[in-house]
Amino acid sequence: MANYHIKTPGKLEVGDVYWKGDNTWTKIYADRKVYTNKTTADTQAATTTTKTLGDKTITYQPDWWKNSTVVTE
């Protein structure tokens, strides 16, 4: 059975960072969150944020999710 994790390009650093969970990314590969189900990883990687500014509501996907990749281990 395959395992999966989520990675995205680091913003200020060279190389990738890995989703750790609890709203946290890490450079440490061993600390990444491992998923046993690809659908669950894909759902996490599709995370969006909704903000209300005055009378307008905006939903968008933050860059760290937009640029993320679900990787098979």
Image: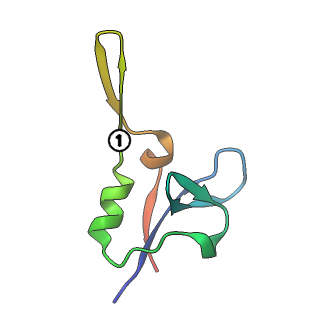
Q: Nearer the viewer, residue 55 or 29?
A: 55
Q: Quadrant of residue 32?
A: bottom right
Which residue is found at the position 36% from the left and 57% from the top?
A: 44
**Rendering coords of residue 61 (x, y %):** 39, 39
Which residue is at 38% across, 55% downward?
45
- Disc 1 marks which residue? 48
Please determine whether, in this image, residue 6 is positioned above or below residue 61. Answer: below
Residue drawn at the location 27% of the way across and 67% of the way down: 39
Q: Residue furthest top?
A: 54
Q: Please identify the residue farthest to the front as the structure is shown.
A: 22
Classify residue 59 by image quadrant. top left
Measuring 51% from the left and 46% from the top, which residue is drawn there?
64
Q: Is residue 31 above or below residue 69?
A: below
**Residue 67 at x, y percent in the picture:** 47, 49
**39 sits to left or right of 33:** left
Q: Amino acid at mark 1?
A: Thr
Label 1 packing within 10 angstroms: few (<14), some (14-19), many (20+): few
Picture quadrant of residue 54 = top left
Q: Secondary structure at mark 1?
A: loop
Q: What is the x, y in percent for residue 70?
A: 41, 65
Q: Is residue 16 above or below residue 49?
A: below
Quadrant of the image containing the N terminus? bottom left
How many numbered discs, if any?
Answer: 1
